Amino acid sequence: MTGRDLKLHILYGVPCVGKSTTAIALAHGAGIRTVVQTDYLREVQRLYVAQDDVPALRKVTHSAWELYGPPTRHNIVRGFVAHVEAVAPAVGTVVAKLTSDGLDAVIEGAHFYGPVIRDLQQANRGANIRATLLVTRTANELRCRITRKLDARADGAVDKLWRTRLPILLAIQRFLIADARTYGIPVRTAYEWRDRVAL
């Protein structure tokens, strides 16, 4: 495989929009052996980065607003961006490694927005990096997806607080939709995306 043939698919969005399911379906359908979940990159970073150095890394995308005050739209977006930027070095390292190894991959997670994707594309010109923002079309759809995902989790799993933070997740999704339009990134539901690529 030559560098210009390399494809890296980024599927991102708020929790419970179907990123993991879509990433696995894409990898299986396209014969891609590597699926990277950014949550795991964040967890590795937490072992090596001092909390005082990067406080946002100790939060998640939908709780980082707590570093800035009450959950206003401004603080929610500010916290989200701070958290994404905190995880970006790990994502960048993995993308650079995949590019140098010439391995197609699917990368999924909540840790993306336009500037991070643009930086990845500029730093890895040997890769065709394609990003898609996955969304739900309604608050009720996201609420139902959260319920299904929580019901599928094993007993004793950590409560992700998605139900109680639904308004915050929706505020982040609205920000991501506007941001994706600014950067020319496709915005689709998981169902629309899978239908489009016939998975």
Image: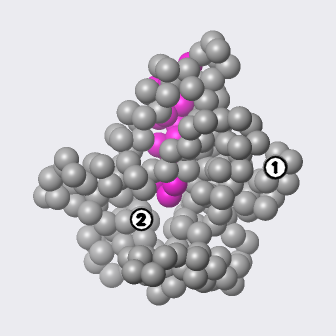
Q: Position of residue 171 (x, y in %)?
A: 53, 73
Say which residue appears at 60% left-offset and 57% top-offset.
20
Indicate which label's residue lies in the foreground, 2 or 1.
Answer: 1
Q: Position of residue 119 (x, y in %)?
A: 47, 34
Rounded to the nearest angstrom, the CA distance separating label 2 from label 1 is: 29 Å
Residue range highlighted in magenta: 109-126
Residue type marked 2: Thr
Say which residue appears at 30% left-offset and 49% top-offset.
44
Residue 120 sits inside the magenta stretch = yes
Residue type marked 1: Leu
Considering every residue shown, the one lying at the far bottom of the view is 164
Residue 165 appears in the picture as rendered: no
Q: Position of residue 83 (x, y in %)?
A: 36, 58
Q: Left or right? Give the position of 157 relative to 179.
A: left
Relative to 89, is 68 above or below? below
Q: Left or right? Give the position of 139 relative to 30.
A: left
Residue 114 sits inside the magenta stretch = yes
Say which residue appears at 54% left-offset and 31% top-offset.
121
Residue 148 vs residue 72, the one in the foreground: 148
Q: Which mark, residue 175?
A: none
Say which residue appears at 74% left-offset and 37% top-offset.
30
Mark 2 or mark 1, earlier in chain? 2
- Secondary element type, mark 2: loop
For label 1, the residue is 199
* Quadrant holding the N terminus: top right
Residue 59 appears in the picture as rendered: yes
Relative to 42, is 125 above or below? above
Q: Which mark, residue 61?
A: 2
Dividing the picture into quarters, in which one does residue 90 lie? Answer: top left
Badge 2, how many Cα within 10 Å: few under 14, some, many 20+?
A: many
